[in-house]
Image: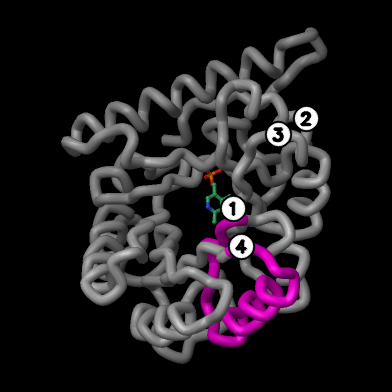
Amino acid sequence: MGGGAVSAGGGVPGAREAELAANLARVEERVTRACDAAGRARADVTLIVVTKTYPAEDVRRLAALGVRHVAENRDQEAAAKAAACADLPLNWHFVGQLQTNKVRSVTSYARCVHSVDRVRLVHALSSAVVNAGRPPLDCLVQVALEKKPGDSGGRGGVAPEGVEELVTALAGAPGLRAAGLMTVAPLSGRYAGEPAAAFERLWEMSRDLRARHPAANMVSAGMSADLEQAIAAGATHVRVGSAVLGVRPTLG
Ligand SMILES: *Cc1c(COP(=O)(O)O)cnc(C)c1O
């Protein structure tokens, strides 16, 4: 899977618009079908288009096509694009590993951070939001289902055992809102190659979390290759990049 996106673009005026429109329509159809299959309302799932590695012009084209949620994973790139698109009615999401020295910048454009994975980051985000007098920032704890307690390094995210501590920290942090959980289908461990099982596990964790924090109801899961499995498992937000914009030339 991967959505069959084409990434040419071409030199023909309007060709990129047409390509993005066609890709977006295909993704929208996949989301709608997955919602139907799961007996869920289409309105229960928010499509976030991940625009990393693609230029601000593409973000502008997507906004013209009705996209309202976009995501980035690197601050330097995101900050420039958000500034170039400041006139557009877009909600920016940050989904990448986040260093504390980038927090002040990220909180200046992002309304939601999906990648909270350590207490130090919670404190840094809170200070940045409070000091700049910004509205409350939605924060998701990124769960790395493949990690054991104490594992650090590798891809972002905290081991399942560490979620509670982070949610408690978020709930008590001025300027932040404990908004839910996020995951990326693991490449290793017992959930490798089993995105459906991984997303079901995330859903169970979300259910436990909502019993104590009813407002922490966002479940961010599913990308181009596995958005159907995520929607079947209860995802409220899917993060789709290459199926809309084309296969990225570099890892990112
Ligand atoms: C790049 C990225 C996505 C989108 O991935 P695609 O496979 O291109 O859809 C989703 N989530 C995160 C955290 C990402 O870094």
- Whichever of labels 2 and 3 marks the residue nearer the N terminus, that label is 2
Residue for badge 4: 135
In front: 51, or 179? 179
Q: Quadrant of residue 128?
A: bottom right
Residue for badge 1: 93
Q: Give the amino acid at mark 2.
A: Glu
Whether 179 is among the magenta residues is: no
Q: Nearer the viewer, mark 4 or mark 2?
A: 4
Q: Give the amino acid at mark 4.
A: Pro
Magenta segment, which residues? 111-135
- Whichever of labels 4 and 2 marks the residue nearer the N terminus, that label is 2
Residue for badge 3: 88
Q: Residue 16, image x and y in percent?
A: 70, 18
Which quadrant would the N terminus be assigned to in this image?
A: top left
Under circle 4, the secondary element is loop
Q: Nearer the viewer, mark 2 or mark 3?
A: 3
Q: Give the amino acid at mark 3.
A: Leu
- Whichever of labels 1 and 2 marks the residue nearer the N terminus, that label is 2
Q: Residue 91, image x and y in percent?
A: 60, 45
Q: Nearer the viewer, mark 4 or mark 1?
A: 4
Q: Quadrant of residue 119?
A: bottom right
- Whichever of labels 3 and 1 marks the residue nearer the N terminus, that label is 3
Real-space CA distance between mark 3 and mark 1, rounded to the nearest whole angstrom: 15 Å
